[in-house]
């Protein structure tokens, strides 16, 4: 049955990729001071859609629809503090939308929350990119990334690097050189289609079935790194894997790229053994048995999250590996991914005046 809704004047759409294979992660932080990160933007995207109408004094000016969680609620902008989804509410507050507009924001992603793939950064980048169309001027991808990071660091007071937001804003394959926290340059790694397609075919993302979240282990690692200084061996080892990854991909050398991924995972383990969980190690062991070239525990590591695998040249063996991983534990699942040539994208859907929305 068709139901009438208030006429929508504008529909704004936005998507931003998630991030995998962040070799050099942990070095894009305040306590590292300077860092280098190699990362890859992939589909599935974080998706945002905003339905905008003039504000005519209606009770609920801002409605947030967190579709993945099945939650739709009104956000009162004058209300102090945060309600059900602080990340979304803080991003909306950061953007200072004109008070003569009312809108509903719908957020969705097929990537699980807490997968260690920068999903929260992708959501924030997509949301800020969409809201930017309601404010004067136009932000660059770099500016969007820094605003997205500021939401987490300045408004929500969380520990947060910058590489996730930069990858979501720029997309593609990136070499991030953070020369002085949080300031960084981003160099897109341009390779021939044959290398791009082969990389896409070889990459596998395995979700471990539990959301990753900050833990006492992460807090302890941060304390240790803060006391050790930015040039300590543990951080330097992580930085080095980013340059090795960049050089290997330019050369089309997947063996060396896999080694860099595995070196990064071992460097994470040296930060603390529990950053490589038993479930992550179980996936890695199965991948080894199937001749995988490399493996990277995504994000900071720890319980839950996901693992990126770089397989060998045989697709049948890759499919066999995926089946064995999913059979090994009912929590494990393969998330299909595709390399994203683009980062943040925003556009508007044309709405015919007077036509009811369904």
Image (cartoon, rainbow, N blue to C red):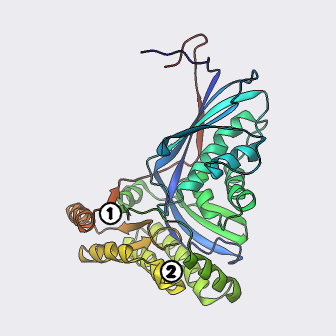
Q: Nearer the viewer, residue 322 or 65?
A: 65
Checking the image for residue 82, the label placed there is: none
- 10 Å crowding of disc 2: few (<14), some (14-19), many (20+): many
x and y percentages locating residue 190 in the rendered image: 52, 58
Q: Nearer the viewer, residue 133 or 271?
A: 271
Q: Please indicate whether residue 115 sits to the left or right of residue 311 in the image.
A: right
Q: Residue visible at 23% across and 60% down?
A: 319
x and y percentages locating residue 291 in the rendered image: 26, 75
Checking the image for residue 332, the label placed there is: 1
Q: Please indicate whether residue 170 sits to the left or right of residue 312 in the image.
A: right
Position of 190 relative to 273 (above/below):
above
User: From where the camera sits, is residue 267 visible?
Assistant: yes
Q: Residue visible at 62% across and 21% down?
A: 8
Secondary structure beneath label 1: loop
Position of 25 relative to 122 (above/below):
below
Q: Write down the residue under mark 2.
A: 268
Q: Nearer the viewer, residue 28 or 177?
A: 28
Q: Nearer the viewer, residue 85 or 237?
A: 85
Q: Residue visible at 54% across and 84% down?
A: 271
Q: Residue visible at 46% across and 68% down?
A: 249
x and y percentages locating residue 46 in the rendered image: 52, 47
């Amino acid at each position: 049955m068709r139901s009438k809704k208030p006429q929508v004047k504008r529909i704004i759409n936005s998507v931003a990729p998630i991030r995998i294979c962040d070799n050099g992660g942990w070095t894009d932080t305040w306590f590292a001071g300077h860092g280098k990160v190699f990362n890859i933007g992939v589909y599935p995207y974080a998706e945002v859609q905003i339905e905008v109408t003039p504000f005519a004094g209606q009770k609920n000016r801002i409605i947030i629809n967190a579709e993945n969680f099945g939650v739709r609620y009104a956000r009162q902008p004058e209300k102090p503090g945060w309600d059900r989804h602080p990340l979304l509410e803080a991003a909306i507050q950061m953007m200072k939308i004109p008070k003569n507009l009312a809108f509903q924001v719908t957020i969705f992603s097929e990537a699980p929350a807490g997968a260690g793939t920068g999903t929260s950064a992708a959501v924030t980048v997509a949301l800020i990119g969409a809201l930017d169309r309601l404010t004067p001027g136009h932000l660059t991808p770099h500016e969007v990334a820094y605003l997205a990071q500021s939401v987490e660091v300045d408004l929500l007071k969380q520990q947060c690097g910058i590489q996730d937001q930069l990858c979501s804003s720029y997309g593609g394959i990136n070499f991030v050189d953070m020369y002085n926290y949080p300031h960084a340059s981003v160099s897109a790694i341009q390779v021939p289609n044959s290398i791009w397609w082969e990389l896409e075919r070889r990459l596998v993302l395995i979700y471990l079935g539990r959301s990753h979240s900050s833990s006492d282990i992460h807090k302890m690692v941060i304390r240790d790194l803060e006391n050790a200084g930015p040039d300590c061996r543990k951080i330097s080892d992580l930085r080095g894997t980013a340059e090795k990854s960049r050089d290997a991909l330019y050369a089309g050398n997947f063996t060396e790229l896999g080694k860099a991924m595995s070196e990064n995972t071992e460097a994470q383990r040296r930060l603390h053994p529990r950053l490589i969980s038993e479930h992550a190690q179980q996936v890695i062991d199965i991948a080894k048995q199937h001749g995988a070239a490399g493996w990277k525990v995504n994000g900071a590591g720890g319980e839950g999250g996901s693992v990126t695998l770089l397989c060998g040249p045989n697709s049948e063996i890759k499919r066999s590996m995926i089946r064995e991983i999913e059979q090994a534990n009912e929590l494990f699942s393969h998330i299909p991914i595709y390399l994203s040539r683009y980062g943040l994208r925003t556009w508007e859907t044309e709405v015919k005046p007077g036509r009811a929305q369904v």
